[in-house]
């Protein structure tokens, strides 16, 4: 599902792509597919293989583990990177809390995408570091 | 006027209206009729066939119908090899296409495809009100009992023939409205569908914007005519033979790619198109690659092979959410608008119900061989949920479940054409016994919950042969079990029996025959 032409402008404001030029943003937009999920629809399924790396364009999504809601994601946030990087099934459900528009890259393409775009890899690492910091804070 | 008077389905109120008479609309109407569901079909076209009355522009299909397979053509298993015929319950109306083809190719010509669809409609008695253009849509209280103040709603279709009303609409209007991205100057060049006769491109320099199948189809057709062909778009070309799916340029159109690879008269650029400018008798096309380098090329002709959008008219204003470049309506697993209940879709638009897209692989809902099954499942869903007509669910012995499912993943055409999208489901209800639920969208099976059940699919991960996957729902939780691929694509051997029996044992042992 090729992306809508307004996607380049939308992702230009996301921290993950903050270092990219116009043509690079356009190339990224064309590498991803666009998906839409109705309110309440599951995006990722805990324990089911074959998912991908998602970036939220519009709407909010809930992280649900064993049917318990844990956290909320919004535009510019991403999910599915852990299962994609590890080649494992997701450990949580991601559920659309509102109508949800996302960019998606199959898990098998994430490694090639990140190694080709080191600045995006760095920004993603920063995001993972923030998540780890928050989790450590929460645990302590 | 006499002809109009003889047309079926005059303006008025119906319980269900289908808009469109391409393969999607025809398949749905056929399947609804066989379930005894009254409905009207209206179409702007003069006859059956939809976009295949005009396209592909080079007049040959992209998908094959293989005449000789070792399987009788009236058998269900033959559908796996015949990607172009519509589905019929009665043997004489099955596999219409191979009998019409002239033997010069296993890709039907466009006229053969059109003839096949016309023959199917005629033989099966599908009735359509042709020449009736859907203009606009509204919603209002239903005049039917239970409607109006009672909360019932009708959709109101204003057409060139008058006003129609129905509580349930199905749009099967294709994805064939030309789309041009907002590139300065691109609005002045012809689109895919506006291609001139090929001889007018003789010895010309042609710049094609777009590197998907439509761009490569044009390039293939112009190889013997053009002096130089340039194809350009931002992302690199994918080939279906590499992706092991229909994602990417199909093998029929790979020749320009080889020509470019061995340095002939074709150039393939990964670059954004910044501007198309008319300069005297020629065009100047300015491109920029991801390294920021600009390249301006001269061309005698520029063609926009930039895709198509869904002709939804005013449905978005009614609340129908759309997404992607093609502005597809977002849909539930049963192809109902995700945002406006009562509006459904059939045909190639059903690719807007993406399913799981496991491993990034889409369904085949964009093509006849995929959406013909969606239409049959949709007809049953509408019959059950909107008309109170329950489907037959046959009993199946516990001992027969394993061989039956292995037979289905080996030969069931729905599973072969709609991988990881449609599933064969067996209900394992403790009270009513084991029953065959039929073909169900996999996403619905995984997300809707319910009694113990098993769903079998065929799946691909883009790297090799397909393999069966079984999803077992027990006590509300679903477990996924992938079986190994087989080099001969036969999953009926002893090893498969033993493995699947082991997977299903915990649920089959608890689902005995009812008392």
Image (cartoon, coloured by chain):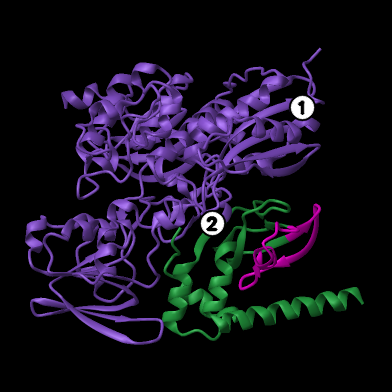
- In the image as oriented, which residue stretches furthest toward the top? B515
Q: How many marks?
A: 2
> Residue B386 lies in what quarter of the image?
top right
Say whether marks 2 and 1 touch (CB < 8 Å).
Answer: no
- Which span of residues is magenta-colored? A63-92
* Residue B421, horizontal then vertical, whole percent: 55, 43
Q: Is residue B234 left or right of residue A91?
A: left
Say which chain is purple: B
Residue topped by disc 2: B360
Residue topped by disc 1: B508
Frontmost residue, B411 versus A55:
B411
| Residue that appears at 78% across and 39% down | B476
Look at the picture and state if B370 lies above or below A46. above
| Residue that appears at 54% across and 56% down | B360
Look at the picture and state if B131 lies above or below B301. above
* Residue B175, horizontal then vertical, whole percent: 36, 50
Q: Is residue A7 left or right of residue B85?
A: right
Q: Is disc 1 placed on a helix, strand or loop?
A: helix
Q: Earlier in the sequence, mark 2 or mark 1?
A: 2
């Amino acid at each position: 599902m090729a992306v809508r032409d307004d996607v380049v402008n939308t992702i230009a404001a996301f921290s993950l792509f903050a270092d990219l030029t116009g043509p690079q943003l356009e190339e990224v937009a064309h590498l991803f597919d666009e998906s839409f999920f109705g309110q309440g629809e599951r995006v990722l399924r805990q324990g089911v293989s074959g998912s991908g790396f998602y970036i939220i364009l519009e709407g909010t999504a809930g992280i649900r583990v064993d049917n318990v809601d844990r956290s909320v994601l919004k535009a510019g946030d991403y999910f599915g990177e852990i299962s994609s990087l590890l080649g494992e099934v997701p450990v949580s459900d991601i559920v659309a809390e509102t109508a949800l528009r996302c960019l998606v890259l199959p898990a098998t393409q994430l490694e090639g995408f990140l190694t080709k775009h080191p600045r995006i890899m760095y920004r993603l690492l920063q995001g993972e570091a923030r998540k780890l910091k928050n989790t450590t804070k929460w645990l302590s | 006027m006499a002809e109009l008077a003889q047309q079926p389905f005059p303006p008025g109120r119906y319980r269900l209206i289908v808009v469109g008479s391409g393969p999607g609309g025809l398949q749905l109407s056929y399947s609804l009729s066989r379930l005894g569901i009254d409905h009207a079909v209206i179409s702007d076209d003069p006859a059956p066939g939809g976009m295949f009355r005009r396209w592909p522009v080079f007049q040959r299909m992209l998908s094959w119908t293989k005449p000789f397979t070792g399987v009788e053509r009236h058998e269900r298993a033959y559908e796996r090899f015949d990607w172009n015929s519509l589905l019929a319950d009665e043997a004489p109306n099955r596999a219409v296409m191979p009998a019409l083809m002239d033997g010069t190719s296993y890709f039907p010509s466009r006229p053969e495809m059109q003839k096949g669809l016309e023959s199917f409609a005629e033989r099966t008695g599908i009735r359509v009100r042709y020449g009736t253009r859907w203009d606009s849509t509204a919603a209002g209280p239903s005049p039917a009992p239970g409607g109006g103040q009672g909360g019932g709603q009708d959709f109101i279709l204003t057409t060139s023939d008058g006003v129609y009303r129905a509580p349930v609409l199905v749009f099967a209007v294709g994805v064939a409205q030309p789309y041009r991205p907002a590139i300065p100057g691109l609005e002045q060049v012809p689109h895919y569908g506006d291609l001139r006769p090929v001889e007018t491109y003789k010895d010309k320099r042609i710049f094609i914007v777009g590197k998907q199948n439509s761009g490569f189809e044009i390039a293939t057709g112009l190889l013997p005519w053009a002096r130089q062909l340039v194809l350009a778009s931002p992302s690199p070309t994918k080939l279906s033979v590499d992706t092991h799916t229909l994602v990417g340029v199909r093998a029929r159109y790979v020749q320009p790619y080889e020509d470019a690879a061995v340095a002939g008269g074709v150039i393939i650029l990964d670059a954004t198109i910044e501007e198309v400018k008319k300069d005297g008798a020629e065009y100047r096309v300015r491109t920029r690659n991801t390294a920021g380098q600009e390249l301006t090329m001269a061309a005698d002709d520029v063609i926009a092979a930039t895709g198509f959008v869904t002709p939804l008219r005013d449905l978005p204003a009614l609340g129908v959410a759309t997404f992607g470049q093609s502005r597809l309506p977002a849909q539930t697993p049963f192809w109902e608008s995700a945002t406006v209940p009562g509006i459904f879709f059939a045909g190639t638009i059903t690719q807007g119900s993406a399913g799981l897209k496991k491993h990034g692989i889409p369904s085949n809902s964009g093509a006849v061989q995929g959406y013909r099954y969606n239409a049959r499942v949709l007809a049953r869903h509408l019959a059950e949920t909107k008309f109170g007509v329950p489907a037959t669910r046959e009993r199946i012995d516990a001992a027969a479940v394993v061989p039956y499912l292995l037979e289905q993943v080996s030969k069931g055409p729905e599973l072969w054409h709609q991988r990881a999208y449609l599933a064969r489901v067996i209900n394992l209800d403790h009270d009513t016994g084991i029953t065959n639920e039929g073909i169900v969208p996999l996403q619905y099976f995984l997300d809707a919950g319910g009694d113990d059940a098993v769903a079998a699919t065929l799946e691909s991960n883009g790297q090799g042969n397909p393999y069966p996957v079984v999803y077992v729902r027990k006590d509300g939780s679903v477990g996924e079990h992938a079986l190994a691929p087989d080099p001969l694509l036969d999953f009926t051997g002893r090893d498969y029996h033993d493995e699947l029996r082991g997977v299903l044992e915990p649920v089959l042992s608890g689902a005995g025959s009812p008392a």
